Amino acid sequence: MASAAQPQQINVTDLDLPQLADVRRQLEEELNHLSTSFTQLRQAQAKFRACIDNVKQVKPDNQGKTVLVPLTNSLYVPGKIHDSENVIVDVGTGYYVKKSRAQALKHYEAKVDFIRTNLEALQETIQKKQDNMNYLVNVMQAKLQASKNAKA
């Protein structure tokens, strides 16, 4: 059986300046992608926290009261709360499930926790990439200085 190819490690101090520039460009692209993903995860987490707050607002005291029901992100229609014990939960890919308030809270809290763990892992990865970038920049500066000194 063929084993998976192991990535070969190269010492960046052995690379010349154009190769270092290519590695830097690649690291910058990775950092931009990871930062964008981090931002999107934070936004998703904020939406799930808003859902938790919304579920907490559906309580027996509010039964029969008029509320604004979102049809889209920018379109709301007036409606009345008839069942204050159950809510409709978007579970993804266009599927909705009727859940009790407690089940809905548990569902959204699990989503927030899942995203939190992913954010922590992603933050670690971003920090490692930034450390790699700083090291690479230092190597590039040292090589530039060495080439200037050699020419002088």
Image: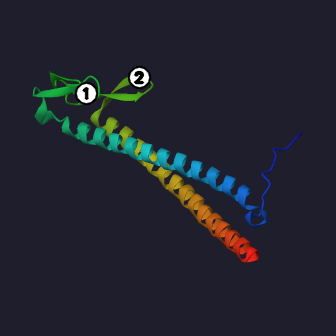
The residue furthest front is 152
Q: Say which element carries label 2.
A: strand
Residue 146 to residue 69: above or below: below
> In which quadrant of the rendered image does the C terminus lie?
bottom right
Q: Quadrant of the N terminus?
A: top right
* Residue 106 in view, yes or no: no
Three-letter code, disc 2 = Tyr
Cα distance, mark 2 to mark 1? 20 Å
Query: Which labelled disc corresponds to residue 100?
Result: none
Give the residue drawn at x 16%, y 26%.
81
Q: Nearer the viewer, residue 41 or 81?
A: 41
- Location of residue 82 (image quadrant): top left
Q: Name the residue under label 1.
A: 74
**Whole-percent x and y of residue 5?**
82, 46
Q: Of marks 2 and 1, which one's residue comes earlier in the chain?
A: 1
| Depth check, front residue: 53 or 78 | 78
Residue depicted at x 17% and y 27%: 68
User: Is 98 positioned to the left or the right of 17 in the image?
Assistant: left
Query: Which residue lies under the disc numbered 2?
Result: 95
- Residue type at numbered disc 1: Ser
Give the vertical position of 140 relative to 21 (above or below).
Answer: below
Residue at horizontal 12 percent and vertical 33 percent from the top: 62
Label 1: element kind: loop
